[in-house]
């Protein structure tokens, strides 16, 4: 049994060991889409309940394929790199929902945000994420 941690904002636990999807995308393409889907399926069947991805990674397709018809628990975290661009952040949220085939995004993060510049550099992006959370399609933790 894999060790878990509570994510209070979601009211659920996730495995401490997660699956990072970057190697399945074009930035580090070491796997085909089908191979990536098999990795995702093997991970969740092996008990992993946390998958990390990002719009920039281009990995939504293998994740969606790997989770097709999966009924077990899984928490997805994705990220936007839309620094100071609300419209682009909204597009990233919509793309994630559509391409992952999900009604909600469990965790939406700002990619490479530096805390001391978060408000100045990421204000419009955070506004988009918080607006999406109020509508229901995204949680931000």
Image (cartoon, rainbow, N blue to C red):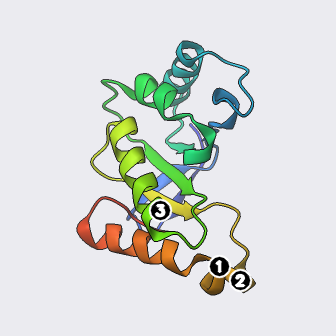
Tell me if label 2 and label 3 are in contact, CB under 8 Å: no
Residue 99 occupies quadrant: top left
Circle number at residue 121: 1
Residue at (57, 73) in percent of width and height: 84
Residue at (27, 48) in percent of width and height: 103
Q: Nearer the viewer, mark 2 or mark 1?
A: 1
Mark 1 or 3, nearer chain start: 3
Tell me if label 1 and label 3 are in contact, CB under 8 Å: no
Circle number at residue 117: 2
In the depicted structure, whether residue 39 falls above or below residue 134: above
- The reply to whether residue 54 is in sight is no
Nearer to the camera, 51 or 64: 64
Circle number at residue 89: 3
Disc 1 crowd rating (10 Å Cα; few below 14, some 14-19, many 20+) is some
In the depicted structure, whether residue 74 falls above or below residue 116: above
Please provide percent x and percent y for residue 27.
Answer: 72, 34
Mark 2 or 3, nearer chain start: 3
Please provide percent x and percent y for residue 116.
Answer: 74, 85
For this view, does 48 lie left or right of residue 30?
left
Mark 2 to mark 1 CA distance (whole Å)? 6 Å
For this view, does 39 lie left or right of residue 137?
right
> Can you say which quadrant of the picture contains the N terminus?
top right
- The reply to whether residue 10 is in sight is yes
Disc 2 crowd rating (10 Å Cα; few below 14, some 14-19, many 20+) is few
In the depicted structure, whether residue 51 falls above or below residue 105: above
Tell me if label 2 and label 1 are in contact, CB under 8 Å: yes
Circle number at residue 59: none
Nearer to the camera, 121 or 136: 121
Secondary structure beneath dot 3 equals helix
């Amino acid at each position: 049994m894999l060790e878990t941690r509570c994510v209070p904002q979601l009211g659920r636990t996730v495995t401490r060991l997660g699956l990072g999807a970057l190697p399945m995308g074009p930035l580090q393409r070491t796997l085909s889409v089908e191979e990536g889907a098999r990795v995702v399926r093997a991970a969740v069947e092996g008990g992993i309940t946390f998958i990390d991805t990002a719009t920039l990674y281009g990995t939504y397709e293998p994740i969606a394929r790997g989770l097709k018809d999966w009924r077990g628990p899984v928490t997805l975290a994705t990220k936007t790199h839309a620094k100071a661009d609300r419209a682009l952040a909204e597009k990233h949220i919509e793309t994630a929902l559509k391409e992952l085939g999900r009604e909600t995004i469990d965790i939406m993060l700002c990619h490479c945000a530096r805390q001391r510049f978060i408000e100045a550099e990421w204000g419009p992006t955070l506004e988009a994420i918080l607006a999406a959370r109020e509508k229901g399609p995204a949680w931000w933790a």
